[in-house]
Every structure is written in structure tokens, then in C-alpha cells.
Image: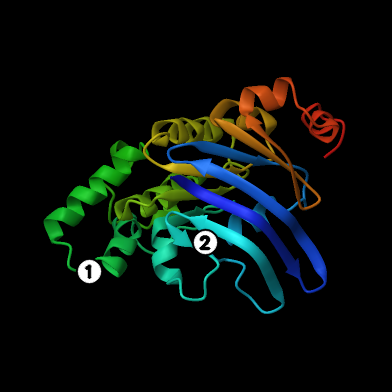
Amino acid sequence: MNAVDVRELSLWYGTFQALDRVSMSVKLGEIVALIGPSGCGKSTLLRCMNRMNDMPGVRITGGLDVGGYNALSPQTDVLQLRRDVGMVFQRPNPLPMSVRENVLFGLKLHAPATSAADREVALESALREVALWDQVKDALDRPGEHLSLEGRQKLCIARLLPLKPRVLLMDEPCSALDPEGIAAVEELMARLRGRYTLVVVTHNMQQARRVSDTSMFLYMGEMVEIAPTADLFTSPRDERTSRYVEGRFG
């Protein structure tokens, strides 16, 4: 069973077609990089996976299964879908509350019967997983917004982990970070490999090469090429892919 299956997915914003019959699949535990020039549909595709394109004027056709959900079905519980398919945004967006409350927010919302002791275990486990525990263990009641950019992005990832999501969607998660922060978040992605499925939008070609198992190149709403990352960057099959990874456009 795949973590993500996309079948002939098309999307229109009004009369503008942003995705054109996109098909792709992501294996359980895999890290996939979605690459392509600005405006090619990468973030639009990512946002389809947990129903963030639900808005007036948007029309979607095709099929999309994510984390065991039919993501496009009107019968799908969107809150449950977003519990199991978490999103990390371009700029860190911690909630205006303490580090502790940020990490436990989803658990309290979706599993209110969880005991206080189990919450503390989940808190420490999530913060250790993202390598924040040693930094914040004596400041758990300080506002999460007081952390560095890198720390805030790690906190946003930690906020998802107590719910044990099936898929993590990351939309340019390192674009606001300095080189040290980028390295720290990439190390975190590597630690999550195999236990979580990650779909990552990135404009950073070197990052795609460093962190992903598979790369997928989109261009003008079309899925042009999918291949193991090493193959896509060293021997792309499509001329458009070759021109993009060589930096000749984009």
C-alpha cells in the first residue's frame, strides 16, 4: 500500500488550470521532493493532499488517496484527514502559547482523554525527536514564538508528532532559515525517514538531492518526470527536466 496515490488530478482556480492530469505515488516511509519553477503547481498539489484548496472557485477532478483517506471525497472528515496528514509551512507558525501547549495542542484536541502522564511522555518524545528537548526542557512554559526561526520550525514539526501522522507535507520548510538551520532541519528529515512519509516542496536542488529518495519534476501544472533522485539529477529522461536541474531556467 502506498502512502499517497494521485490519479489524473486536475485543478482549476476559476478558469486558470493549475494542475493538468497529474499522477504520482509515494511509498510508505519514503521522502519525496517536488521540484519545479515557481508557479508550476508544486504547492497546489501539496495542498490538495490535506484539503487546503477547499475554497470557492476551485474545481478538482481525478483521484487522490492520502494516508488511507479518499482526500477528495465530500464524506471524508477533513479534521481527521489533517490529523493524519500534517502540514509544515514555509514560515514557522507556532501557536501563540507556550512550547508545552504548542506540542500538546493536537493531542488535547483529538485525544482529550489522554492522561497527564501520557501527555508528558508525548511532549518529551516529540521534542527529543526534533532535537529540541535539551534546548527547551527548562523553558517549556515560555512562548514558542521566542525560539529562533530554526527552533520554531522544529516546534511546528514536533506539534504534529504526538498524533502519529501517516504523512508529513512540507512546503519549502527551510526557505526562511540560515545555512545552520537548513542543515538542522535536513538532519531531522533524515531521522524521520522510514517512520514517516514526507512529501517536500523545495526550490533548493541541492536539498532535494541530499534528503529525498525520489524526485518529481512539475512544469506548468504537468508531472513531467518521476525517478529515483540520483537518476533524475544525473540522467533525466525529459529535456525539460535536464534544462531545469542544470539551472538553464526556473
In-front residue for pair 186/177: 186
Residue lying at 45% horizontally and 61% vertically, measured from the top left: 69
209 lies above or below 90:
above
Residue lying at 37% horizontally and 48% vertically, measured from the top left: 158
92 lies above or below 244:
below
Residue lying at 38% horizontally and 53% vertically, measured from the top left: 160
Q: Which residue is mark 1?
A: 112
- Callout 1: helix, strand or loop? loop
Farthest top residue in view: 234
Disc 1 residue crowd, few under 14, some 14–19, many 20+, Cα 10 Å: few
Quick one: label 2 or label 1, which is nearer the N terminus?
2
Q: Is residue 173 visible?
A: no
Residue 42 placement (x, y as % from top left): 68, 50
- 134 displayed left or right of 230: left
Q: Which residue is mark 2?
A: 50
> Type of residue at label 2?
Asn
Q: So how many labels did they put on this image?
A: 2
159 lies above or below 15:
above
Name the image quarter holding the N terminus: top left
> Type of residue at label 1?
Pro
- 219 displayed left or right of 109: right
Name the image quarter holding the C terminus: top right
Residue 52 placement (x, y as % from top left): 57, 66
Cα separation, mark 2 vs mark 1, equals: 23 Å
Quarter-of-image position of residue 196? top left
Single out the mark in the foreground, 2 or 1.
2
